[in-house]
Each structure stands twice: as structure tokens, then as C-alpha cells.
Image: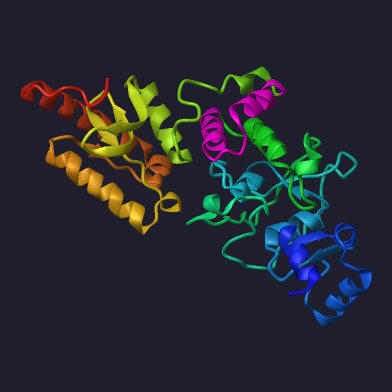
Amino acid sequence: MSLLAVTLSLLGEIARARTLRARGVSARDIRAALDAGAVTAPRTGWIASPLADRDQIRAVQVGGRIACVSALGRLGLWGGDDRRLHLQVPHSASRRSPWIEPTKREAAGVWQPKVPERRRERRFVLLAGSMEPRIHYRPDPAPADAFDWIVSPQAAIASALRCLDDENGRALLDSVLHERQLSARQLDALLARLPKSVSTLRDEFTGVPESGVESLFVRRVARAGHVVRPQVDVAGYGRFDGCIDGCVLFEVDGEAFHGNDRFFEDRDRTLVSQSYGRPVLRPTAKHVLDEWPLVASAVERVVDDAKALMRLRGLPPLVD
């Protein structure tokens, strides 16, 4: 593999020509690769490998970087369900950025190069829809951690916390801490620089749920008046996503976070708990995101029945 190909891979498959030259790739090698069709120049001064995805190309073509919730997806962090492409552009750019309709049709995109392998397992980068992108003009607070085509993790998180609604913002905080993107101290420092409305997103659950949909489920059930304990170890049962009112266990399923082995382990725990007369709720990510009234109704019925069964059989709470 050529130095150019290796360097592009380390930079996320697309970079400025001057960045490549600063890393030892000669202008002659770049010209030769362009002439041979091994790379392309999506914009003057930019070089892209064949693996660069269409959203990266779109960002470069409008003179920006992938940002906000779009950057979160490439970091393996929760970013809600906004499928627009979010871009950061310089203040000097036109307030109405030019737009070039994408032609590439990939199924998945390129990860931010520093994302660890453990975070990529059984996941993929979901590309944006073809609608007009959302433009952000705030400068990057940590430019040294940015790449030519994507903002720094700090910038992505700060922008998304302003962009997302409260429940998705809280899910993002959980994701940042669970995935160890930032330490608790680093996150607090970032929140201190944001509007007070953002800093109040921290609550008693922050950092405990292990996926975005789990975060949504936990807080919605708690708002309905239930006592929710996320991430509980129950003797004889194993570890569950949580427990409601000390009597109903729950597991929030999502394909992005469960491979075949994990799927079997989850079902195994469910069978064990049910053999002891303990119900387990298993909503999927789609149920939580798209059919919440059905989930809420099921929670109320299952919890009521479980409490009646506890009284009838004299069973102790699963957790205090």
C-alpha cells in the first residue's frame, strides 16, 4: 500500500493536499495518483480515496466539516434521529451555502479515525438523507482534535447539546460517559461553557444507561412516576438493563448493540427470571422510538400485575 493510501486511511479517507504533504506525501505522488484514478479531487486542494463516503464529499464541496449530530454518529455516540447532514462552516462563508446533489449511494460511512475498535463492533455509520444540510457557524473549541473533514469530539458534543431536545441531550451525556469519550470532569468542564439550560441536563441517571434508547426508556418510565434502577445485578438472574418498582426487570433491545451471543445471553436471563415468576419487559429500539404509547401501556399493566403477584406470593423486591 502506498504512503498516500496509508495516510488517507489514517486521516479518514479524505484530507487537504497540504495536510498530506505535511505528513510526507509528495506533490508528485499526489499528482500521479490523480492521473491514475487512484484518488479524486472533490474540491481544489482536497484529495479523497475511493473509500470516502458521500457525506464527506458533500461537506468538502460546501467548504465545511461534518459536525454536531452527524459527527456524533461517526464517533459511535448517541445523536437522536435527525437524518440531516450537519455541517460546520467558517463565519466568513456565505449564510446560504452552495449545495451539490450527492451521486454516491453507499450503505454506510467512514468512522472518525480515532474511534476505538470496541466502539465500532456490530455498528455502522448511518449516512445522512439527501435533504438540505443544517449549517453551524460556531468555531471549534478544540481544533487540535479535529480532522480536515470533521470537527473535534468536543465541538460535536457541544453543538449537539444545543441542537437536541432535552431527552436526547441527556441520552447523549450517558453515551459520552459510557463510551468514555470524555471523563466526568471533562464533561463538566464542557457543560460549564454552555448555556445554563444545557448544564441542567445532568440528572441522577447520567452516565448509567448503556445505550441511547435505554436512556430514553429509563427517563420516560421515571417521569411516569415509577422508581427505576438502571443497570442492576440481581442474584440468580444476572445483569439487566434495569428494574422498575423493584418488581419488573427490563431489557431494551437494539440491533446496533446486540450481536448473536449477546442476543442468546439476554434470552437466557429472561427465561431464568420468568422461571422464578419475575416478569421481564423487552421493548425494542423501534418500540421506544416509534411506538412509545404502546410501551407505556405495557409498562403500567406489567408493573401492576407484578405488584399483585408479589403481594399474593409474599415475594421480596428484586432490588431495594
In the displayed structure, 306 sits above or below 255; it is: above
Q: Nearer the viewer, residue 282 or 83?
A: 282
In the displayed structure, 185 sits above or below 179; it is: above
On the rendered structure, is 319 left or right of 198?
left
On the rendered structure, is 245 left or right of 21?
left
The dominant secondary structure in magenta is helix
Q: What stretch is highlighted in magenta?
A: 166-193
Q: Does the magenta stretch include residue 259?
A: no
Which residue is most to the bottom?
36
Q: Is residue 183 magenta?
A: yes
- Tell me which corner region of the image, top left, top right, bottom left or bottom right, holds residue 21: bottom right
Image position, residue 256 (x, y; %): 45, 52
On the rendered structure, is 180 left or right of 205?
right
In the displayed structure, 98 sits above or below 184; it is: below
Q: Quadrant of the N terminus?
A: bottom right
Image position, residue 291 (x, y; %): 37, 41
Residue 43 visible in the current orientation: no
Q: Which of 222 and 100 is in front in this view?
A: 222
